[in-house]
Image: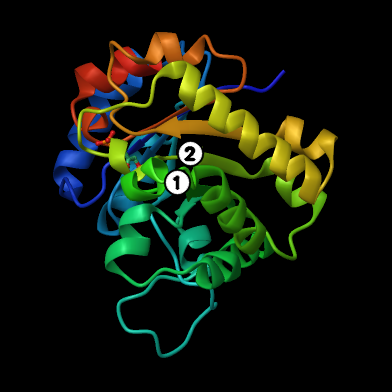
Amino acid sequence: MRRAIISGNWKMNKTPEETVAYINEFKNNVKDADAEVILCPPAICLTEAVKAAEGTNVKIAAQNMHYKESGAFTGELSPLMLKSVGIEHVVIGHSERRQYFNETDETVNLKLKAAFENGIIPILCVGETLEERESGRTEAVLEGQLKEDLAGLTSENVKTLVVAYEPIWAIGTGKTASAEDANDTIKFIRNKVAELFDTESAEAMRILYGGSVKPNTIKGQMEMSDIDGGLVGGASLKVEDFSAIVNY
Ligand SMILES: O=C(CO)COP(=O)(O)O
């Protein structure tokens, strides 16, 4: 039985002070949650966030990292730095990073390997654009991303990997894939990973849905056979809304 994960991706929102205030309220609301609870604040908030969440069931994740351990990479953070402040999860390959910051399947692959080498669990984002969907290429696009992003990983890696299926047309638009459609695509992802690795590893891997998840959509999504949780953007910014999602 796969344990659900509900993760909030704050993107470029909230200061360290706002982060601490949020966590101080949020931690009490979600202390009895069945799901694993993860918050992804901006990098500058990570240290404070880890401290504020200490001793609770709220885990703190980074939104990105570099694949090298150190060096001349101005503005970047390394896996070692994240580890040193107590980070155990990192979002890799979010569509916004692919779209605006030149993230490619090749760098995503290097980052996934670096995360596993450093004992950090990656949350890998994959998904298709509206144009790719409308031209019937969703499965081909996902297959390409999975093949390249997961190249060279081991079955053991795949068992702990978290994948987030985030159709790009559903991010921040208020449009969600129907729960059935998202479930079918997530099943496709699981089957592809079974083909690339093995069934046991693919069955152990958690696959989340992301894209306009709201308090009133999560229940239907979580009733699906293969949706193992949510990666929530906008609705994770308000304690009340995200608490309702976590406690679906
Ligand atoms: O990109 C997302 C989470 O990573 C989804 O964002 P929204 O929930 O705002 O659509």
Locate the N terminus and report the quarter of the image it occupies. Answer: top right
| Residue 138 visible in image | yes
Residue under the image location 52 percent in, 66 percent down: 105
Numbered label attached to residue 247 = none
The secondary structure type at the circle numbered 1 is loop
Q: Residues within 10 Å of mark 1 (few under 14, many from 20)?
A: many
Q: CA distance from mark 2 to mark 1?
A: 6 Å
| Residue closest to the far front | 135
Q: Position of residue 117 (x, y in %)?
A: 68, 64
On residue 165, which mark appears?
2
**Which kind of residue does numbered mark 1 sit on?**
Gly
- 105 relative position to 202: left or right: left
Q: Amino acid at mark 2?
A: Tyr
- On residue 127, the disc is 1
Query: Picture coordinates of residue 76 (x, y %)?
Result: 36, 74
Comparing 210 with 189, the one in front is 189
Left or right position of 235 against 231: left
Residue occupying the point 59% across, 57% down: 144
Q: Residue 19: image x %, image y %?
A: 22, 40
Answer above or below: position of 226 versus 87.
Answer: above
Residue 130 to residue 42: above or below: above
| Disc on the earlier residue, 2 or 1 | 1
Residue 186 placement (x, y as % from top left): 57, 31
Residue 232 lies in what quarter of the image?
top left
Q: Is residue 37 left or right of residue 8?
A: right
Question: Exactly how many numbered labels are in the figure?
Answer: 2
Q: Is residue 93 left or right of residue 161?
A: left
Labelled pair 2, 1 in contact (Cβ < 8 Å): yes
Ligand 1 rendered quadrant: top left
